[in-house]
Image: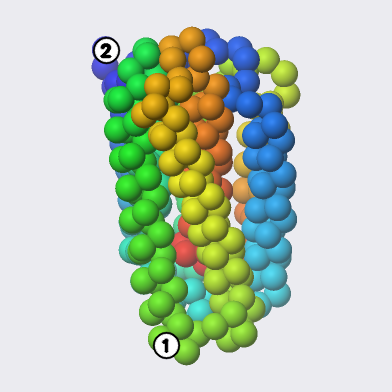
Amino acid sequence: MNIAVALLAPQGRRRDLPGDLAMWFFIFAELLVFGVLFLAYAFARARNVELFNASQLELDRISGAINTALLITSSYFVVRAVDRIRHGASRACVHWLAAAMACGGAFLVLKLVEFGAKFDAGITMSTNTFFMFYIGLGFFHFMHVVLGMVILGAVALKAWQGGYSAADHTGVETGASYWHMVDLVWIVLFPLVYVLR
Amino acid sequence: MKQATLLWLLLLALTTLTTQAATLSAAAGLTGSAVPLVLLAALIKGRVVIDRFMVLQHVDGPWRWIVLGWLLLVLGLIGYAFNLNPT
């Protein structure tokens, strides 16, 4: 199979919503909140273009790009974990979930280093409107990564104990859906705050 | 899983491409020139996550369009806002 065919081929014609419906309502609520915050940033910037462009130069774009790669990779590992549990391979599922959490942990460490450097430079939320959004949005997303890791940890523990099977693995899909949402939000947040000018 | 691996590599490549394009355009003082490219890359990446990683592509009901609609609306309005006062 060549690369183009592999990319375009459907990954399975699943017709029901993966995971628990309650989690999806939670995900929609989270997306709504992040969407409002993103648009608040974008329209606030439109009134302070020079301030936002100048302040953005203080950010470490490479650090943001590495964090994007970490979250994308962790999402891919979660896809692998779901695939393994669909085949009844609990231990392999746990290993992929652990790899995803390691990426999430690296994201958090990098983000803390980034925030620490800003605070050391005397930059706070009160510095200006740009940094209010940068720190506020970044910390809000940071807390979602923490919650996502807690969820993945709980799912991994249950999988380790043999709590999921090929026939019954809704919990794995529920945790995976939340983690992909955290990734999806960062896919918008990174270019918005670090790249676009 | 080969497909998921290729999509993962595509996502990484798009991240590198947009970061580099934005860095180069900023270095050249071309403010705003990379906005369409960066937003398009974000749209492609978001769609891959929604359709393939979240596996919403063939799900019955409005679920896929709620998430995809969120992405389209947010990126569209960001694009609009970045064109309100170009410098």
Image location (x, y in percent) of residue B82: 63, 62
What percent of the width, then of the height, locates residue A185?
56, 48
| Left or right side of B63 for A13 | left
Residue A24's place in the image compared with B87, above or below, is above
Residue B28, disc: none
The chain identifier of the residue carrying mark 2 reads A
What kind of element bears circle 1? Answer: loop
Res A121 label = 1
As drawn, which residue projects farthest toward the bottom?
A122
The residue at 50%/85% (across/down) is A123
Residue B5 image position (x, y, % from top left): 31, 28
Does residue A77 appear to the left or right of A136 in the view shown?
A: left
| Labels 1, 2: front one | 1
Nearer the observer, B61 or A191: B61
Image coordinates for residue B83, horizontal then vertical, percent: 65, 61
Q: Answer with mark 1 or mark 2, whichever residue precedes in sequence.
A: 2
Near-viewer residue (A91 or A84): A91
Whether residue B47 is visible = no
Say above or below: A122 vs B34: below
- Chain letter of the residue carrying label 1: A
Residue at 34% of width from left, 48% of height from top?
A103
In the rendered image, which residue does mark 2 sit on?
A1
Judging from the image, the colouring scheme is rainbow
**Figure quadrant of the N terminus of chain A:** top left
Q: Which residue does the image show at 35% across and 22% down from the upper left?
A: A90
* Residue sitting at x 49%, y 74%: A56
Structural crowding at the residue carrying mark 2, measured as other residues with C-alpha within 10 Å and reported as few (<14), some (14–19) or many (≥20):
few
- Under mark 2, the amino acid is Met
Q: Is residue A101 visible?
A: yes
